[in-house]
Amino acid sequence: MALELRNIRAGYGSGTIIDIVGYSFEQGFITSIIGKNGSGKSTLLKAMDAQISYEGSITIDGNEVSKMPHGERAKMVAYLPQHLNPVAMSVRTLVSHGRFPYKSFGHNLTKEDVRIIDEAMEMVEVANLSHRQVSSLSGGEMSRAYIAMVIAQKSRYILLDEPASDLDIEHQIRLMEILEELAKRGCGIIMTSHDIPMALTYSKEVLLIENGRIADDGSPDEISKKESLKRVVGVGVERVANSRLLFDYNLIK
Ligand code: ADP
């Protein structure tokens, strides 16, 4: 029961951007992928959702993601890209797209679909925007609408590319709590982030990416005690024990 990478090479055209020997993502917790701009984090997420072709194997329970029929893959993996489309449809319609993998062709949404859509919109506080056009929303509102869509998809893994970057601090924390809750329900959450203190606070595993390769991996505590984070992103972290602080880690030189 894992999303496994084996000897992955992927890129755009003929160039290799990511080159990963092996890694296994488990369900039930948050894994953060950390690395500099251009290190290949987005490319890795795109490969895991078979948005780009790859060499090697990326499997869920032994099934190759690139060979799964589209609807089956969508039940396994939901993917939230970094750049979202201001589509010309209502928030409710966008969120209902999350249910498409479960609908047979030409059938309307079931009562259960509608319940799941409503619950997802409530969770990220976009229920009050449900009739608004996505294209009319602010950046933060739009990312919450898209997050509701991936929640409604109820996939085994959710891949999120810098999901908090457009959100105000209150919604960032709320998002991390929601992701934690989804993880507790059994989902595997895999996210990229530049907010290292926040990512380490909420993650169980951290994957450091440097020039398309895994530079190091481990628990936030393990990573905080090593030099690898400093080498990969230029700053270190230290654990802080103060319950008044929002995050369990501080950035250090
Ligand atoms: P990160 O998410 O870590 O910032 P990316 O995966 O977006 O990094 O990018 C890794 C490398 O791939 C960069 O050198 C970037 O310029 C290149 N790249 C990203 N997207 C494309 C694309 N669509 N076509 C060609 N090269 C790309």
Image (cartoon, grey):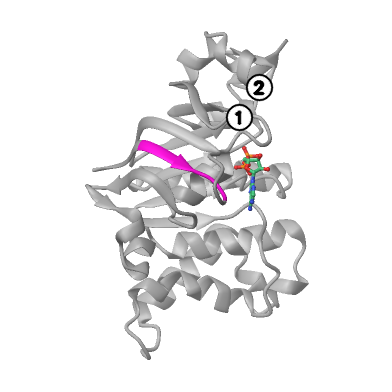
The structure residue drawn at horizontal position 52% and vertical position 8%, both measured from the top left corner, is 225
Of 17 and 109, the residue lying toward us = 17
Is residue 151 rendered to the left or right of residue 13? left
Please identify the quarter of the rendering in which residue 197 is found: top right
Q: Which mark is residue 1?
A: none
Q: Is the shortest distance between ligand 1 and the CB of mark 1 under 8 Å?
A: yes
Disc 1, SS: loop
- Residue 9: in magenta span: yes
Q: Main secondary structure of the magenta part?
A: strand
Q: Residue 115's spot in the image, x, y percent? A: 41, 73
Provide the residue designation for mark 1: 35
Q: Badge 2: few (under 14), some or many (20 or more) residues near its Cα, within 10 Å?
A: some
Residue beneath disc 2: 233
Position in image of residue 120 (x %, y %)? 49, 63
| Residue found at x 60% / y 69% | 127
Boundaries of the magenta span: 7-12
Residue 48 point in image, percent of width and height: 43, 48
> Which residue lies at the image location 57% right of the left edge and 8% below the top edge?
227
Is-magenta flag for residue 25?
A: no
